[in-house]
Every structure is written in C-alpha cells, then in structure tokens.
Amino acid sequence: MSMPEFDKAGELKPRLTGTLPVPDGSLRRSASQAKLTRSNSVDRLDKPLEHDKRKRAREEDIKLGTGAMKDFSVIGVFSREAFENFGKAWKTVMSSDSLQRPTKVSKMDAKPTEISDRLGRLSSSTITTGFEDQVQALFENRTVPHVIAVIEGKKEQASFSLKTRVEDKPVGLSYTRTTFSQGLNAKGSIDDKQSMSFYVRDDMKAAYSFSEVSVEHGDEVIRSVAIDYKTQDGNMYRSLVVHIPNQFVGTGAKESTTHQAFEGYAKATAIQKNPVVVTGYLGDTNFQRPYFKDSVPSMGGHLSSGDALNPRGSGAQSKDTHFMQHVPVGEDQGGHSVMQPATLNYLFLKPDDVNREATDHPSMIAITAHGSEISGRDPAVLPDYYRTI
C-alpha cells in the first residue's frame, strides 16, 4: 500500500481511489472520505490515522477486512450538561492541565513524549458565544461528521454551518436539525437532562432518518434515538444514541444486564419483517468501565505500542470513569464493523444568568465501517465539498 502524500500546506493529497466521477458527474465520496480534509490524529507510526486503520471497538470483529471497507457512517456526539452543577467540577479538573484528561490506566506505560504529542492534537476552548461557535470549536481539525447528536440541553438553533477546508479552499458545510427528542424524568415530567437534538449535514439528509425507540430492560425501558440508514447492497442499519439513566449502571452486573437488553433489542430487529441490523449503541452510557477494551474513545490516535490514551469520562477525581462509549451489539456479520471512537476537542462553556448549560464529559465521534456505500448522498447540495481537484 502506498504511503500518503502531502501538499505544501501539510494536508493529505487526494488519492484516485474513491474520487473518480460516477456517470452523472458527481463524486462517489464526500471530501473527508476522499482524503481532502482529515482529522489530525495519527497511527502508531505517526502517519495520519485513516478510518479503516482504527482499531475495532470489539477486537474479535474482523470479518469485514480493512481492504473491504467501502464507506463509513460518521456520527459526532456533543455531550452537554443541562445544568451547570457537574460542569463546574469538570472544568476545574479538565481545563487546567491536559495530563488530567486521560485515564490513569491508559497513560500508565505510555512514553511522556507520546502523551504530550497525542494530547496536543486536541484543542481546549472556553466558548462564551453561541451554539454554532461551540460546534466549530468541537470539530476543529477533527473528522467531519454526517450527523451530530447533542446529548442534554434545550432545543438549539435550527441550522448552522461548520467551516472546514478542501485543500486550500474554505468550505461551509450546512447542517439542519431534523429531530429533537424531549427528555422526561422518572415521573414523566419534562427534563432536558434527557433531551437530545440531531443535526444532519445537508448533503446526507436523504441518507439518514431518525425515530425514538424503547429498549426493554426487565419491567422498564431505556429510551433511545435510532439513526437509520441503508447501504447500496440493500441492507438496513441502525445506530442507537443513548443517555442511559443511572438506575441501569454503576456495577459490573448492572452494566452487563443493560448490555444484554441492547443485545435482545438487536436480535428482535434482525428477525422482523423488514430486518434492520443494529450496529451498536453510542453516547453517554454512564458505564464505569470500558464494556469492550476499545469501545471507549482514543485521544489523538494510536501510541507506538498500538494502544491509545482514553479520556476520563467525568470530572470525578476519585477514579477513572468511561461514560462515553460506542458499544457494538449483535454478531460479527462481515457487512459492517464498529470502529474505536475518537475524542473530540475539549470544550468548556461559560454559564450566565440566562444560560445555565455546561459540559461535563468528553465529546466523541463514532465511526462504523461498511462493505457497501451508504445510499442517499446528494453532492449537488454541497458542490464545493465534492469538487474534483
């Protein structure tokens, strides 16, 4: 396999594979997948970390080989705190010293120079302005997402533009809110701590659809939002975005039972009249431990050992936590593979008398590989992002 090439600005040059026009003149892939824009994470050899080189979230899921990966579903998760209580501790611990951000276990045997380099690939910002500026800081120099899920908080603005570059040209990528899931507390009252908003990049509106679903957990249910999409081989896929309530987590036994609830849901959707493959659940799991070794996000890519730094899941000083995860479910079928998620930039908000929101977890980007291309892209909506160079 040829090594990646760079232009004068240090950006990856596009490869021919995946960038040739199809008969109607459009491009097969968006610019991020054509290597025209990229994340600044690196692999164990200090080369740019491409999606197919990420580790598998569940290491035994190897039926879909790297060479067979044709497309990737990319979902960004912006983790918010609806009320600033926990955000204060988070900001105190995480904004002052980047060495506090990884878990103790993940940095235990890492070289100090590598720790510094990987952590330096994530920026840190305190944003005093609006939602669009928050999103821009969150995804600066990170992978461009198809979907952005905002966990917790009120319904934000209906649309925004995410600024990126295609080689030397600035490009604005428009996103539109398609779904707002109003959170409820245990008594059924409105509670934004369980609310979620979903934004879709406008060229992908026909690719993704959303619905609220309930995952049965004994006599209770876990409310989730399903993100559905189809690949060109005719398979239907679903990713579940979650904010798992505290009563279902906290011990290994509880977390195992909760995982089995999602496994049961996946089995049921796979045998229904119109089968849907549930790839996994992602977001704020509130799990204390990694469910699988690499279902927790990496920070800045891979270390030379092949391992990765993982972010602490909260501002708690007493122990490592791993709340943000992308956990695969179902059997390794060969049509898809859930990859290790990536940590997004660190973002701290400044609450005021009107806006009491904050952040209290790292945010992440979830990546699922597929052996067939995702259906529904419309390059005509964002032509500068798909342009041939």
Image (cartoon, grey):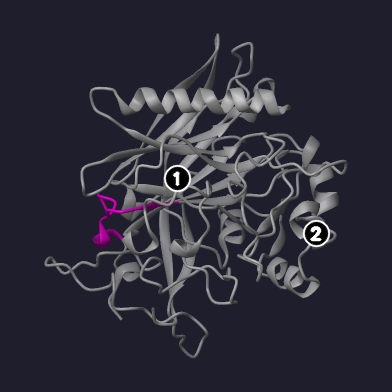
Q: Are marks 2 and 1 in contact (CB under 8 Å)?
A: no
- Of 233 and 121, nearer the camera is 233
Inspect the magenta stretch and tell me whether residue 378 lies in it.
Answer: yes
46 in magenta: no
Residue 107 spot, x, y in % from top left:
77, 60
Q: Position of residue 121 (x, y in %)?
A: 66, 69
Viewer can see residue 223: no
Q: Where does label 2 land, which residue? A: 108
Quadrant hosting residue 219: top right
Closer to the camera in the image, 92 or 233: 233
Residue 169: in sight, yes or no? yes
Residue in view at x 51 percent, y 86 percent: 9
Give the mark, 2 or 1, whose residue is nearer the N terminus.
Answer: 2
What amino acid is found at the position of numbered circle 2 in the picture? Answer: Met
What residue do we see at 73% from left, 27% from top?
251
Q: Is residue 382 left or right of residue 343?
A: left
Residue 72 percent coordinates (x, y): 38, 55
Numbered tag placed on residue 131 in the rendering: none
Q: Secondary structure at mark 2?
A: loop
* Relative to 39, residue 174 above or below: above
Mark 2 crowdedness (10 Å alpha carbons): few <14, some 14-19, many ≥20: few
Residue span colored magenta: 368-381
Q: Quadrant of the C terminus?
A: bottom left
Q: Residue furthest left?
A: 23
Residue placed at 35% from the left, 68% from the top?
385
Q: Residue at x 37, y 58 (%)?
A: 65
- Disc 1 marks which residue? 199
Label 2 vs label 1: CA separation?
37 Å
